[in-house]
Image (cartoon, grey):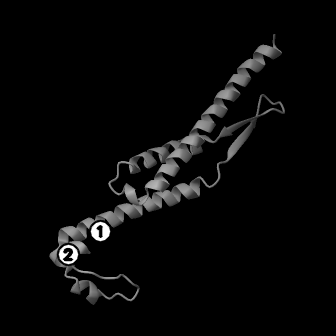
Amino acid sequence: MDQCGKSITVTPEILLRDMWNLELHKNPDFVEDTADQAKQEMKMENTLKKLQKEWAEVDFGFDSHRGTEVMLMKMADDKFEMLEEHQVQVQNMFASRFLSTFETEVVSWQKTLANISEVSTLLSEVQRSWVFLENLFIFS
């Protein structure tokens, strides 16, 4: 509230009269900027909560390989698409001028999602190679 030369402590007991006495209506640009910042920070906070909820556990499915007892592990396609979407959302947070409030958490999510993506990709590559090599060794 330094911008308008007033000071107030926000408590549950604050009244509309207290807000009016601040004469915030005389500084509409400051009020608008503050409200915009609060809105953007809330949006980032909600996105981070959504990430926490969605990625608390990463479930992989198992499919039988050609009807054998060998199981191949795979992330569901919809989960992989959501992973890519969430990576874009986290990347977009870095472009926000309000990043500083959540920077540590956003950096952590960027690393976490990148790790999930890399593990899933490597798992697919290893299994693809194994399936190819299995054919060479069994049928040769």
Task: Tell me, for residue 4, which label it has, or none.
Answer: 2
In this view of the protein, which residue sits in the foreground, 82 or 14? 14
Q: Nearer the viewer, mark 1 or mark 2?
A: 2
In this view of the protein, which residue sits in the foreground, 92 or 111? 111
Kindly identify the residue that appears in the image at 57 percent across and 39 percent down.
Answer: 117
In the picture provided, is 66 more to the left or to the right than 89?
Answer: right
Circle 2: is it few (<14), some (14-19), or many (20+) Cα within 10 Å? Answer: few
- Residue 17 rendering spot, x and y as whole percentages: 26, 89
Kindly identify the residue that appears in the image at 74 percent across and 40 percent down.
Answer: 62
- Residue 83 rendering spot, x and y as whole percentages: 54, 44
Task: Tell me, for residue 120, which label it has, or none.
Answer: none
Above/below status of 81 relative to 16: above
Q: Secondary structure at mark 1?
A: helix
Q: Report, in whole angstroms, how far the alpha carbon at label 1 lies from the one at label 2.
A: 15 Å
Circle 1: is it few (<14), some (14-19), or many (20+) Cα within 10 Å? Answer: few
Residue type at mark 1 is Ala
Kindly identify the residue that appears in the image at 29 percent across and 64 percent down.
Answer: 36
Name the image quarter holding residue 18: bottom left
Q: Of marks 1 and 2, which one's residue comes earlier in the chain?
A: 2
Residue lying furthest top in this view?
140
Task: Tell me, for residue 35, which label it has, or none.
Answer: 1
Residue type at mark 2 is Cys
In this view of the protein, which residue sits in the foreground, 7 or 39? 7
In the picture provided, is 63 more to the left or to the right than 8?
Answer: right
- Residue 70 rendering spot, x and y as whole percentages: 81, 32
Kindly identify the residue that appears in the image at 32 percent across and 54 percent down.
Answer: 97
